[in-house]
Amino acid sequence: MTNKLIRMGYYTSAKGGAPKPFQIPDNMLCFELITAGHVYAPTGNPPQLRGAGWIFVHQAGQNTVWQTEPDDHYECMVVSFNAGQPQEKETWPRNFFWEDIHQAVSFAHEMLYAFHHTRVDQEVLGNLIWSQFRFRRDQFRRQSKQKIPPRVVSVMAYIEKHYAENIAVEDIAARAGLSASHLHADFRTFAKVSPHQYLILQRMQAARHALATSDTPIKVLAQEVGYANTENFCRAFKQHSGLTAADYRQKYMVYK
């Protein structure tokens, strides 16, 4: 592979985003994999907010993402490669989506840990990351041929922002002008999960991220992601992640 891994890190913005964007230098290709929060895509009119699972690609002369809502922030894994020779360069969209957000966030933490805390060969690591991004890019291109209805997208966005609240599917459906059964059918068709399952996925995503990046007590963390009962949270977390919350933190916490 001619696209050599140069550096890898993790960025957490302040509320409202970064102070300013970073311009990519010559002969560099930069990927930003969003793991938490939301950020405005660098292209699009009007600008679109993107959350965890979105991957942004920046080539020489382009700016990184940096803006979000005033009360929000974003976090991302940042990976830079040598761009290679012009005849060897691949075609990358400016942004694409990794459909399984759990996998995307876990992949980011695992790669960061491997890069900073193990002696894994960086060429092997770079090949793995590059290949994974290529796979997700091609998968996104195939999936994007099937457009998700705007009303379903709006419900997804609402759940992603309010996952920590006591949300009822009937209330969400009413906001979108749908019956609960119609919303359930649309979610099954386009998101491959029910609205309730999508809500749980958002809570689990937030929990995994908090466990890997903070020392917040699990009882407090459970409440922050929408669980009044810690036992219910622990049961759901183990079911979705295959690990207890404490074991997940031990395995994936990168910056202790």
Image (tube, rainbow, N blue to C red):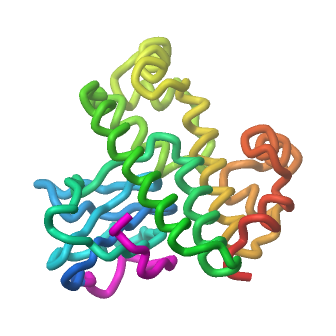
Residue 173's place in the image compared with 251, above or below, is: above
What residue lies at 19% left-to-right and 83% top-to-bottom? 26
Task: Characterize the magenta stretch by its predominant secondary structure.
Answer: loop
Instruction: State the extent of the magenta-drawn residues as a range.
Output: 1-22
Looking at this view, name the residue that lies furthest to the right.
231
Rendering coords of residue 253 (x, y %): 72, 71
Rendering coords of residue 31 (x, y %): 36, 67
Rendering coords of residue 157 (x, y %): 40, 44
Instruction: Between residue 155 and residue 90, name the one nearer to us.
Output: 90
Residue 133's place in the image compared with 192, above or below, is: below
> Left of 252 or right of it: where is 196?
left
Query: In which quadrant is the N terminus drawn?
Result: bottom left
Residue 91's place in the image compared with 22, above or below, is: above
> Left of 24 or right of it: where is 18?
right
Instruction: Between residue 56 and residue 238, name the one nearer to us.
Output: 56
In this orientation, does residue 99 appear?
yes
Query: In which quadrant is the C terminus drawn?
Result: bottom right
Residue 239 located within the stretch drawn in magenta:
no
Residue 237's place in the image compared with 67, above or below, is: above
> Left of 256 or right of it: where is 133?
left
Residue 218 image-quadrant placement: bottom right
Number of numbered tags placed on the structure image: 0
Instruction: Between residue 22 and residue 226, name the one nearer to us.
Output: 22
In this orientation, does residue 14 appear?
no
What residue lies at 51% left-to-right and 62% top-to-bottom? 36
Residue 20 located within the stretch drawn in magenta:
yes
What residue lies at 34% left-to-right and 36% top-to-bottom? 153
What residue lies at 19% left-to-right and 58% top-to-bottom? 47
